[in-house]
Image (tube, helix red, strand yellow):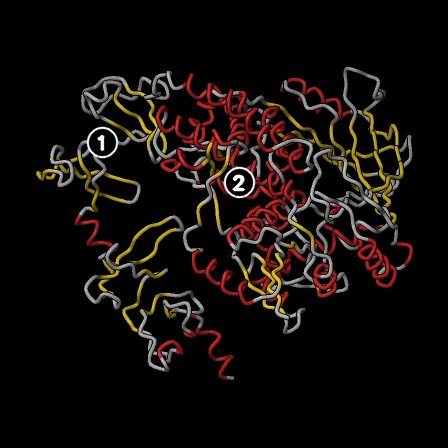
């Protein structure tokens, strides 16, 4: 009896195949196979509003071969099982596959970790597809599409072509902009810190900090003068024992936050590394809101802690989520096998695994105990009740018992060890000095702090945080500089537009309310149709009403120092594809323009040729983000465009295309950066990742019955200077060839 098990990842498929017998065939869908069209041009047919918001799915480009394989293998099999991830997204993928394969009674297999025991148990207990979970995912998808179609289209018309809005993306951008405006409005104030270096009677030296940070230089001088002349003594010594309890095991959001602050990983990187660890069977599923550990995992942790550290370090704990929105009924993120100290193919995966393992073990360990000490000193006859003269103090702590900090010492932070002193002790002043400082504005959000803020406000779900931050980067709304998130000019303009005209729809209340309603759909407490119906009618009315507002042609007047380089008129700020620039206020009658630095931007230059498409316009040379190009003077009415010949020559590699043997490989820029393709594109679609070296790969190819591969060689890395451009050729990874030969 042959059984077909379908998963969504090739890596997952490879791991699971090891645990199943010869009766099982394991295939992968490679993620989603169908989706609602993203393109605004297809939005009219994407969702059938009149038919209860029925989505019209289309096969994702490139998935035709995958679907054909699944259909072929399903026909051969006596039983088909769908083993996608245990969440809404996995449930939706399973349903789509069942629909395409025409399996009305499709069976789901669900496991939280990819271990032999977990997989074998799950296979014995298949269940039907959870339609509530599936409907909740569909509702989210349709909601996001309708939101995006409506707002993005309006932004294109009223602000600039190519911009977008999102149901959670836009509130996240608003949060960043609110902080940015506080920073811009902040006026720094001068203040002084005062430090006194002292020693006690037995010669122990330490520093005391003034309890007040004066804003007045004269007061600083007064404090320094008095403090230098008077006697110093210990007014009070406060000691108290404190406990530090470990944190709960990781959920998706806390893993992303901690990996960002400790390892410097972006949320997207964290999820990518975690996905690899999960698919290899090293950790449990990494998209979860649950902080609980299974009894089996607790048992493993307790045994390991007692054996490795001693019974005094063990303190069994049960964590329960305080969030009412916590969902997905599986465990916290933990190692599948806690005895495995390291795991992962790469250094990044190994670091993340260690972080997860240490957090899991720490959660079942004893509290750390610290002795906290505060030394308060007075000057002369003054005590801390004297309002005219501040006291000096220092805080410190001493670790009495490390407890869970034994396995996670970096969580302790820096402790100041203080000498033993008693109330009334006289101190010798060694040095007293002041340091002038300025008050600082609020700090910008980092990826970690933004995720924490989104979670706190109930915006989005942990599984979506990585996508949200990545989208902000991809849209050009945010830049990351030294971990800080800086909104761009484009992000500022988009957020301001939405805040002015659609405040309700990018508010915390609305976004959190929609998340709750989607949760209700998942729990069967609300319906798909009602959720979307309640949202869409007022939203559509708002979109239609705002369609009447005038196009925002400028973002406000520029400073008087800027004058039009062509006519001398005043200037205004405008938003272009590359961000803000300064334009003549008389545009379109005058096309004078400056960069934000005040440098003149040259306008289009006519080539003397007519546009071959519309016949009405003239061809002009324009300056774009990636260099010069030729377009029609009537753009965007006519969208004819071609590369400037001089620029085109610069991009030619001088290497002939081996596929068509007519074109030449040339540099191009795409979504993921620079690549090289044939100059005859789209007639010839030959493309490679990096610059060709001019050589042809002569490594024997299995696909060509041992004949030379014949693909272009391309530039590699410092350690691998040259490699074959064909990823199916063994010479694509020449560093592995020697190992194979050996």
Helix, strand, or loop for circle 1? Answer: loop
Q: Nearer the viewer, residue 512 or 142?
A: 142
**Residue 156: x %, y % from top left:** 36, 29
Which residue corresponds to the image point at 47% horizontal and 19% vertical from the top-left? 542
- The x and y percentages for residue 631 are 19, 39
Q: What is the tally of numbered marks visible in this picture?
A: 2
Image coordinates for residue 146, horizontal then vertical, percent: 48, 31
Front residue of 675/196: it is 675
For the residue carrying disc 1, how many other residues have a C-alpha within 10 Å: few (<14), some (14-19), or many (20+)? Answer: few
| Contact? badges 1 and 2 (CB < 8 Å) | no
Q: What secondary structure is found at the residue carrying circle 2?
A: helix
- Mark pair 1, 2: CA separation: 34 Å
Position of 584 compared to 373: left or right?
A: left
- The quarter of the picture where residue 662 lies is bottom left
Mark 2, Cα crowd under 10 Å, few <14 / some 14-19 / many 20+, is many
The quadrant where residue 20 appears: bottom right
Q: Is residue 302 above or below residue 218?
A: below
Residue 616 is left or right of residue 1, and the answer is left
Looking at the picture, does residue 645 appear above or below residue 564? below
Tell me if 579 is positioned left or right of 139 in this view. Answer: left
Extreme-bottom residue of the structure: 742
**Farthest residue, direction left:** 608
Of callouts 1 and 2, the N-terminal one: 2
Circle 2 residue: 469
Q: Quadrant of the N terminus?
A: bottom right
Q: Which mark is residue 111?
A: none
- Residue 125, position as x, y percentages in the image: 73, 57
The residue under label 1 is 637
Give above or below for 590 relative to 455: above
Of circles 1 and 2, the one toward us is 1
The answer to whether residue 560 is left or right of residue 94 is left
Q: Which sits in the foreground, 131 or 619?
A: 131
């Amino acid at each position: 009896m042959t059984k077909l098990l379908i998963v969504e990842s090739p890596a997952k498929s490879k791991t699971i195949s090891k645990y199943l017998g010869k009766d099982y065939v394991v295939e992968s869908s490679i993620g989603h196979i169908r989706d609602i069209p993203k393109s605004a041009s297809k939005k009219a047919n994407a969702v059938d509003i009149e038919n209860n918001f029925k989505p019209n799915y289309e096969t994702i480009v490139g998935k035709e071969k995958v679907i054909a394989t699944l259909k072929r293998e399903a026909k051969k099999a006596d039983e088909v099982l769908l083993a996608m991830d245990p969440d809404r997204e996995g449930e939706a993928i399973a349903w789509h596959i069942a629909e395409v394969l025409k399996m009305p009674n499709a069976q789901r297999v669900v496991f939280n970790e990819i271990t032999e025991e977990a997989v074998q148990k799950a296979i014995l207990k298949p269940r039907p597809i959870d339609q509530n979970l599936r409907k909740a995912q569909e509702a989210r998808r349709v909601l996001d599409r309708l939101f995006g179609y409506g707002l993005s289209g309006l932004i294109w018309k009223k602000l600039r072509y190519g911009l977008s809005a999102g149901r959670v993306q836009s509130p996240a951008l608003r949060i960043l902009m609110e902080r940015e405006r506080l920073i811009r409005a902040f006026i720094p104030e001068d203040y002084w810190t005062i430090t006194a270096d002292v020693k006690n009677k037995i010669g122990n030296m330490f520093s005391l900090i003034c309890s007040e940070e004066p804003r007045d230089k004269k007061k600083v001088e007064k404090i320094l003068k008095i403090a230098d002349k008077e006697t110093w003594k210990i007014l009070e010594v406060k000691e108290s024992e404190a406990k530090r309890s470990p944190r709960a095991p990781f959920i998706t959001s806390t893993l992303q936050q901690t990996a960002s602050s400790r390892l410097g990983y972006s949320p997207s990187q964290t999820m990518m590394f975690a996905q690899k660890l999960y698919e290899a069977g090293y950790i449990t599923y990494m998209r979860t809101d649950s902080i609980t550990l299974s009894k089996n995992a607790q048992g493993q942790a307790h045994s390991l802690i007692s054996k490795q550290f001693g019974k005094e370090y063990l303190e069994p704990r049960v964590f329960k989520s305080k969030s009412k929105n916590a969902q997905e009924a599986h465990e916290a993120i933990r190692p599948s096998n806690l005895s495995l100290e390291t795991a992962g193919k790469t250094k990044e995966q190994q670091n993340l695994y260690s972080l997860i393992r240490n957090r899991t073990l720490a959660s079942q360990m004893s509290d750390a105990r610290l002795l906290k000490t505060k030394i308060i000193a007075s000057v002369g006859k003054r005590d801390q009740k004297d309002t005219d003269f501040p006291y000096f103090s220092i805080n410190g702590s001493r670790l009495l018992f490390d407890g869970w900090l034994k396995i996670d010492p970096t969580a302790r932070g820096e402790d100041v060890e203080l000498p033993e002193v008693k109330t009334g002790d006289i101190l010798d002043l060694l040095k007293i000095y002041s340091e002038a400082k300025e008050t600082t504005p609020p700090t910008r959000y980092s990826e970690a702090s933004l995720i924490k803020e989104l979670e706190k406000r109930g915006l989005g779900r942990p599984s979506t945080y990585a996508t949200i931050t990545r989208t902000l980067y991809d849209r050009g709304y945010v830049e990351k500089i030294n971990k800080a998130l800086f909104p761009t000019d484009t992000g500022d303009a988009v957020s301001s537009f939405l805040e002015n005209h659609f405040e309700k729809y990018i508010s915390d209340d609305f976004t959190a309310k929609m998340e709750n309603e989607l949760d209700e759909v998942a729990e069967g407490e609300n319906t798909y149709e009602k959720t979307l119906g309640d949202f869409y009618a007022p939203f559509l009315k708002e979109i239609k009403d705002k369609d009447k507002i005038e196009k925002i042609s400028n973002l406000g007047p520029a400073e008087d120092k800027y004058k039009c380089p062509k006519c001398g008129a005043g200037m205004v700020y405008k938003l272009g594809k590359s961000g803000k620039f300064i334009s003549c206020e008389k545009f379109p009658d005058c096309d004078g323009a400056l960069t934000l630095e005040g440098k003149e931007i040259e306008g289009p230059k006519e080539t003397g040729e007519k546009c071959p498409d519309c016949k009405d316009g003239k061809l002009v040379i324009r300056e774009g983000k990636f260099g010069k190009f030729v377009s029609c003077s009537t753009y965007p009415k006519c969208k004819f465009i071609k590369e400037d010949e001089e620029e085109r020559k610069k991009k030619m590699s001088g290497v002939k295309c081996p596929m068509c043997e007519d074109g030449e490989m040339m540099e191009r820029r795409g979504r993921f950066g620079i690549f090289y393709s044939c100059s005859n594109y789209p007639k010839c679609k030959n493309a490679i990742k990096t610059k060709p070296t001019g050589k042809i790969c002569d490594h024997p190819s299995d696909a060509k019955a041992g004949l030379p591969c014949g693909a272009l060689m391309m530039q590699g890395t410092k350690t691998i200077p040259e490699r074959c451009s064909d990823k199916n050729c063994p010479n694509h990874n020449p560093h592995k060839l020697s190992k194979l030969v050996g």
